Amino acid sequence: MSKVLVLYYSSYGHIAKMADAVAEGARAGGAEVDVRRVRETAPEEVARSAGFVVADHHPLLTDPNELTNYDAVIVGTGTRYGRMSSQMAAFWDTTGGVWSRGLVGKIGGAFTSTATQHGGQETTLFSIITNLLHHGMTIVGLDYAYEGHTGLDEVNGSTPYGASTIAGGDGSRQPTEIELGGARHQGKRIAELAGKVFG
């Protein structure tokens, strides 16, 4: 059985919900799954005044060496000006020691959330994927076998580079079933591939 890590940062709970859906899909794909979050780096007064919601139902991952315990790592974070959040970037900035030993050949994927339909989903996904590629990981996106890509009945965050959701400018829009379904689909695909590669 392969081991999959879903690693995320969530300011308002949207990414935490997507992380749970990714994990659900990965378990359906036959993997043993851990869901962990990275630490909050914003000052407490900033987080409080911005109304951050701490998704503390998953434990923190603070030691980057733990990444080597997994066959696949699926990374999720909201977008900040079209790139990954500083909280997630700060975590990856600590992975130099892991990089020197390598996560080469492990499976990677990315998922995100933005405020608006064109708020930077794809550039944020690429900013995550770039880190994973530098670690030598093989990337799996959200393939077009997922039917949610093709529907036009409602706005959704589907992109072939990874699952995503649209939160709305005030954060009131929650992930839809199409978006959660994409997260499950991607998680399952990654787990299935990890199972084939690592048995």
Image: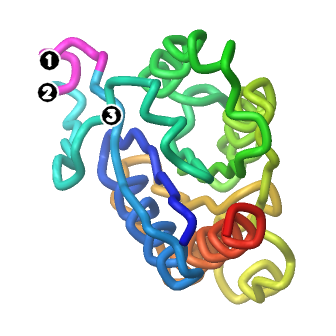
Q: Quadrant of the C terminus?
A: bottom right
97 shown above or below 134: above
Nearer-N-terminus badge (1/3): 1
Q: Which residues are magenta?
A: 41-47
Q: Closest to the observer: 129 or 45?
A: 129
Residue 176: which numbered mark, if any? none
Q: Closest to the observer: 12 or 39?
A: 39
Q: Residues within 10 Å of mark 1 (few under 14, many from 20)?
A: few
Q: Closest to the observer: 40 or 137?
A: 137
Q: How much space separates mark 1 and mark 3, taking CA atoms?
A: 19 Å
Q: Of the residues tagged 1 and 3, which is closer to the observer?
A: 3
Q: Quadrant of the N terminus?
A: bottom right
Give the residue drawn at x 52%, y 72%: 31
Q: Of the residues tagged 2 and 1, which is closer to the observer?
A: 1
**Mark 3 lies on residue:** 61
**Mark 1 lies on residue:** 44
Give the x, y percent position of residue 81.
61, 26
**Mark 2 lies on residue:** 48
Q: Callout 1, which amino acid?
A: Glu
Image quadrant of residue 175? bottom left
Check if mark 3's residue and mark 2's residue have beta carbons within 8 Å: no
Secondary structure under tag 3 reads: loop
Q: Callout 2, which amino acid?
A: Arg
- Regarding residue 115, the answer to whether it shows in the image is no
Secondary structure under tag 2 reads: helix
Secondary structure under tag 1 reads: helix
Q: How much space separates mark 3 and mark 2, taking CA atoms?
A: 22 Å
Check if mark 2's residue and mark 1's residue have beta carbons within 8 Å: yes
Q: Is residue 46 magenta?
A: yes
Q: Callout 3, which amino acid?
A: Leu
